Amino acid sequence: MFDVEAPAPSWSDVLEHPDEIAAELANSRPAPQDAIALSMLDPRVLSAAGRVDLLVALERQAAWIAAAQQRVLASVAADPAAVARGSDRSWAREDVACALMSSPGFSEASSGFAGKSDGYTDLLLHHKLTWKYDRAEKGNVFQAAKLGGTGRYTLALGFGASAAAAIDVTKKSLGRKFAEVSDEYVAGWKEYVKGLRKVDARYENEFQLAAMVLKAHEDKTYRGAMIASMTIPWGFAAKSDTAEVGGYHLVWARDLYEVATGLMAAGDRAAADRALTYLYTVQQKPDGGFPQNSWLDGRAYWKALQMDEASYPMVLAWQLGRTDAETWTKHVRPEAEFVMSHGPVTQQERWEEVGGYSPSTIAAEIAGLVCASDIARKNGAIADAERYMKTADDWAAHIESWMVTTTGHLGKGAGEPGYYIRIDNNTDPNDGFKLDTRNGGGVWDERDVVDAGFLEFVRLGIRPASDPIIRHSVEIVDGAIRVETPNGPSFYRYSHDGYGETYFGGPWQGEGIGRTWPIFTGERGEYEIAAGHDATPYLTAMLHFANQGGMIPEQVWDQAEPTRAGFVFGRGTGSATPLAWSMAQFLRLVVCVEEKRIVETPSIVADHFLKGRR
């Protein structure tokens, strides 16, 4: 046994007793010298049990360091000089103020800067409110208050362009009876639900809830802007309350397209129309493209180029019938020209990690150009219409040669037609390029990395569900990334995904193991409908993936074995919950099942590519 309170072991100790050291570190209280010992251990010389012990020790050390960081933060907050220095204000909005009031009033209250002079840090340090500030300006504000005693209290939080405006609106709100405000709020939602499509009673509650959740994600200032999630994945392990940490509190054009088509299917066409207006009047860039994602006001957050996001608005415009001259001239034409000049290759595909020739991306580009061609024709721009359609046809003709491998290791056999790979770095899917899947997933032969992104060719009307390569690729996906959970089938994003909890269920912080995603259950359900099959098992699975509050998560746990984190096989993880895309996919699948067709397929695309082939 080794005393971990003593100095770190020597190299000779490590060489002679690596498994014993790993076991000792895994079962002892973390200490500073442990970091040295952990850095000495080479997993390649450890036994299987030793490698598990090393993983446990590393996770415990990471938690110890996080706790030490919090202690330092508290000490900084306790330093008056540090508080006086304040926080970085470059991100502050000076046109928004908030006021917090109570009836009866507070006995104590303070408004401070998060991580500097806030009430939470004050309570951690002193177990009572000792810092008293009437206001905090130009920063990440944290408000704390103490109620005057027992009894019933009504709290009101108001916002305004100035402190006076915020106080005024808060006072007016507090002056109304809570029951009156509550009844008005409930009545508004009931009225909204009345306008939704009526669906099978088995799915009605979740259907209505999903639409309401998406509606709640729409911003009140920038109408039509719907963020990816009101949550931040694994937010408890991230600086999620730090300014400029976007998390999923951002707008992705791709996610917004998914949400818009879900709401359209549910019967809220007006929300989808607002979403397109937002995309074109707030997010779209002067060159016709779109940012990877943005804040609500359109300011770009991440800077990569994702060509599916530059294509979906054209599809949505066609679906909504927005073919007027202004939409064509100012928005659709610049967008189509951008896709023509930058596609079909993409800097990043829909999982924002690698670049190349992506099935899901190219499907969106082709569908976008076909829709743009029809809009151009409706506006008398015949030459543009012909150029767009010619390019769409050319890219469609190269789909298989660019992205289908015939030498892959996953589908060998006489007469097999090949299968789609996740992404091809060039136009040779048989060259065995070594693909880094990111997030710690490793480097693999690209032919061994598959996803179900090729189903977008079916969903968007470019290839029939009966296509032999599509069908064979579905079989490959089922063998490689499908998981049968107690709640039904689910799928990984792709082979060797690293975006998910760690091996023992710890939060993703740059590396991990990707878990299964409900949206793929929904996408597969749509494919089954196109193939003439029953998609009810997939719809029921999505319903059961929802938590007790009806929120469908980004990811669900994929293992039957229990973990220290307490995750349950087939239930949500620490990922974003709800994910707006998940809720939208559920809406779409419910309607698709009832109508026995993929309701969001642009008919202009399907008519062009599939007439006579179905």
Image (cartoon, helix red, strand yellow):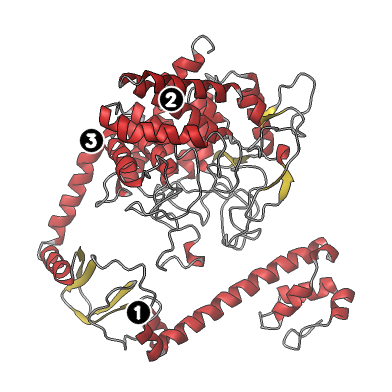
For the residues marked 1 and 3, what is the alpha-carbon distance in whole angstroms? 43 Å
Whether residue 417 sits left or right of residue 19 in the image: it is left
Q: Nearer the viewer, mark 3 or mark 2?
A: 2
Q: Which residue is mark 3?
A: 194
Asked whether residue 227 is in view, the answer is: yes
Q: Is residue 371 above or below residue 350?
A: above
Residue farthest toward the bottom in the current orientation of the protein: 80
Q: Nearer the viewer, mark 1 or mark 3?
A: 1
- Name the residue: 85% across, 79% down: 11
Q: Position of residue 527 (x, y in %)?
A: 53, 26
Circle 3 Cα neighbour tier, 10 Å, few/some/many (<14 / 14–19 / ≥20): few
**Which callout, 1 or 3, points at the residue further toward the start of the chain?**
1
- Name the residue: 55% across, 30% down: 455
Q: Position of residue 596 (x, y in %)?
A: 44, 21
Whether residue 60 sits left or right of residue 138 in the image: it is right
**Is the Cβ of the residue at disc 3 closer than 8 Å to that at disc 2?**
no
* The quarter of the displayed image where residue 159 is located: bottom left
Asked whether residue 538 is in view, the answer is: no
Residue 611 vs residue 42, the one in the foreground: 611
Residue 406 vs residue 124, the one in the foreground: 406
Q: Which residue is mark 1?
A: 118
- Name the residue: 39% across, 28% down: 591
Residue 84 vs residue 144, the one in the foreground: 84
Q: Which residue is mark 2?
A: 601
For label 1, the SS is: loop
**Kind of residue at badge 1:** Asp
**Kind of residue at badge 3:** Lys
- Name the residue: 55% across, 40% down: 346
For label 3, the SS is: helix
Whether residue 244 sits left or right of residue 70 in the image: it is left
